[in-house]
Image (tube, rainbow, N blue to C red):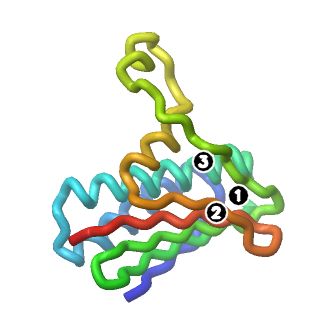
Amino acid sequence: MKSALRIACSRVHLQQVRDFVRNYLTSRQLSEVAINQVVLAVDEVVANFIIHANSEDETQFLDLTLAFDQHDLNVEIADNGDTIFLPGPTPNPDFHAYIQQGRKGGMGMALVNRLMDRVEFFTRGNHTVCHLSKHLA
């Protein structure tokens, strides 16, 4: 079963995204840990699209689609803005050193890569798409 949501590119919609993902996954009777991991990963990618790709331009929007295929969750986040947003490779940072240095920001995609089994960014026409997948037994 697929479920879809469209939001304007504003941070005020991030809670709506988190609730949408949580409700979809809760209906699948998954562990709370698995649900929280996916909610966090999707929230991070959506926030990046809103802030970095669209400069919080509420005239632009994102489409979010969730679907299960057997035991695999597939998430697609499609940016309908005019800017192509393809983040480069994410290094595997030393989280401990990062925290000790008191640094803030810049760790989101590294975290997404650890939480999800597959993270891909690509273009579809002149739009950016992020595909996330996770095996959930």
Q: Residue 102 has which mark?
A: none
Q: Residue 48 has which mark?
A: 3
Residue visible at 21% across and 54% down in the picture: 33
Residue visible at 36% across and 80% down in the picture: 68
- SS assignment at label 2: strand
The answer to which image quadrant residue 84 occupies is: bottom right
Residue visible at 44% across and 19% down in the picture: 98
- Left or right side of 136 for 8: right
**Which quadrant holds the N terminus?**
bottom left
User: Considering only order in the chain, which callout, 1 or 2, is on the residue closer to the N terminus?
Assistant: 2
Measured in 3D between alpha carbons, the distance from the residue under mark 1 to the one under mark 3, in whole angstroms, is 14 Å
From the top left corner, tell me how far across and down residue 77 is, in percent: 57, 66
Q: Nearer the viewer, residue 23 or 129?
A: 129
Q: Name the residue carrying label 2.
A: 8
User: Considering only order in the chain, which callout, 3 or 2, is on the residue closer to the N terminus?
Assistant: 2
Measured in 3D between alpha carbons, the distance from the residue under mark 2 to the one under mark 1, in whole angstroms, is 5 Å
**Which quadrant holds the C terminus?**
bottom left
- Left or right side of 123 for 130: left
- Left or right side of 36 for 18: right
Q: Name the residue carrying label 1.
A: 58
Residues marked 2 and 1 touching at CB (< 8 Å): yes
From the top left corner, tell me how far across and down residue 127 is, in percent: 76, 67
Give the number of callouts: 3
Looking at the rendered structure, the kind of residue marked 1 is Glu
Q: Residues within 10 Å of mark 1 (few under 14, many from 20)?
A: few
117 versus 65 height, above or below: above
User: Considering only order in the chain, which callout, 3 or 1, is on the residue closer to the N terminus?
Assistant: 3
Looking at the rendered structure, the kind of residue marked 2 is Ala
Looking at the rendered structure, the kind of residue marked 3 is Asn
